[in-house]
Image (tube, grey):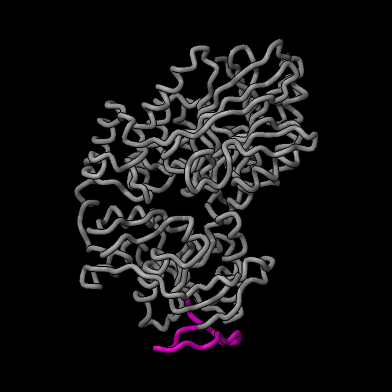
Amino acid sequence: MKRLLLGATALTLCAGFSGAAYADFTLNILHINDFHSRFDPITGSDSNCNAEDDAAGECFGGIARLKTIIDDTRAKYADGNSLLLSAGDNFQGSLYYTTYKSKVVSDFFNQMGFDVVATGNHEFDDGPEEFMKFIEAAEFPIIGGNFDVTRDENLRGKIKGSFVIEVGGEKIGIIGATTEDTPEIASPGANVEFTDVIQYVRGASEALDAAGVNKIILLSHIGYTVDMDVAAALPLVDVIVGGHSHTLLSNTAEGAAGPYPTMVKNPDGVEVPVVQANQYGKYLGDIAITWDDNGVVTKAEGEPFLIDASVIGNEDFKGQLAELAAPIAEAMGVVIGTTTAAIDGARETCRAVECQMGNLVAEAMLDRVKDQGVTIAIQNGGGLRASIDAGEITVGEVITVLPFSNTLATVDLTGADVIEALENGVSDIENAAGRFPQVAGLKYSYTLAKPAGERISDVMVGSGDSWAPIDEAATYTIVTNNYMRGGGDGYGTFAEGDNAYDFGPPLEQVLADFIAKQGGEYTPFTDGRITVIE
């Protein structure tokens, strides 16, 4: 394969390239998204899989199995017309990342033969500095897109918006796009500026087309619904390979959000295939795209492959993981308590309704500071990254649930501010946004049928063993995490509050101490503190 790295502005210089096809051309695209450093296998509920359950064939994914299925699948395409893509969010979500940061991702991804990798919002979690290390270590192009890094000394000149790769004699243009709210949900810093996705992709696709590239893929990290909006708005994008919403698209799997591919008509009436492959390396997306002589997609067929125990993991990768795991296994394996049942921390629940993990974490936060006059806890559902299965709870599982190294934070708000914060929290449920508020010391209702900003009602504050309507004029001290307190996930109200303090104990330590305080045994629950009004 011959590769050409192009920024959006540089594309217009390449108008002499010929992208004309003289026969139908089929490209097999393998893809993952939202891997989140889940190098070890996971259970059916996306929590950590122990060795016993994995040996019993009850677990999924893992980098060793992913390596095997990628190699085996690419080998089937004897003509070599295949691409391996990642739609971003490869950082954050396991002890491997917590311990080794971006190096563990680049080390394994370099060995897997990725052709192009998109930028996810979590690639900015540890700031531009860590993202820079990833870019410099990667042996594959990492594309950005709708963000400007020219003012950031770490990233300036190191990332481009588009990439042209030659496969089977055909030039394929790949455009990157990252969710516009990254500054609110990650830490790109003040010098990285995000712009409108559709506007950027329109310009980049027009530049590719002007350069004679008539096969264009959008490799995006913007979410399934936004992907469909982009497909419907732009005439030159042929295929969208997406991420960010962790969406399972399938023609056979139970609970899939839509068909694989989902076909969306563009302004010219041409159907654009949109694909996504769930999360955590549990599935490998596999879509075959056929273009005609004029560069128009005539066929899109495929189905994501569930990476279960039938896939034998790559032995070399298993050995590398064992070496990495050894230094952290002893500390992370310490048992801090037990749970009488599985604690649900799935994104599908914790970003939309009251969930068991949300209650556990919020109650732990409130318990830690209730003797300081704090009466309300608010935790973003997106900060909860895993479930915990029934039985023993280890330090490692707690850190997997809360991998961001956030600290406990407090701030004084009026009752009106609290309501405003809750409105922000339920403003983007449709896209499974991580801002959804899990709470303690508080009850509220929301109506999804109403427009964002008008959804919250019946807000009640705990008072001893009873509940009272929130007083909009009164001042309440709330506990949250330092990320939200600083305005993350759209909680600007928290950033403007009084008497802010961001330097409490690490959230994972707060949770571990709370579980131990329960006598070592915890029973998960929901109690109706969040009500959905139809």
Q: Which region is colored magenta?
A: 461-478
Quadrant in which residue 487 is drawn: bottom right
Q: Is residue 271 above or below residue 457?
A: above
Quadrant in which residue 320 is drawn: top left
Residue displayed at 51% across by 33% down: 303
Residue displayed at 39% across by 35% down: 307
Relative to the observer, which residue lies in front, 166 or 182?
A: 166
Q: Is residue 33 above or below residue 408?
A: above
Q: Is residue 503 above or below residue 2?
A: below
Is residue 154 something that shows in the picture? no
Q: Is residue 464 magenta?
A: yes
Residue 134 x %, y %:
46, 36
Q: Is residue 398 magenta?
A: no
The outermost residue toward the right is 268
Residue displayed at 51% across by 29% down: 286
Q: Is residue 281 left or right of residue 494?
A: left
From the image, give the main secondary structure of the stretch colored magenta.
strand
Residue 197 x %, y %:
68, 44
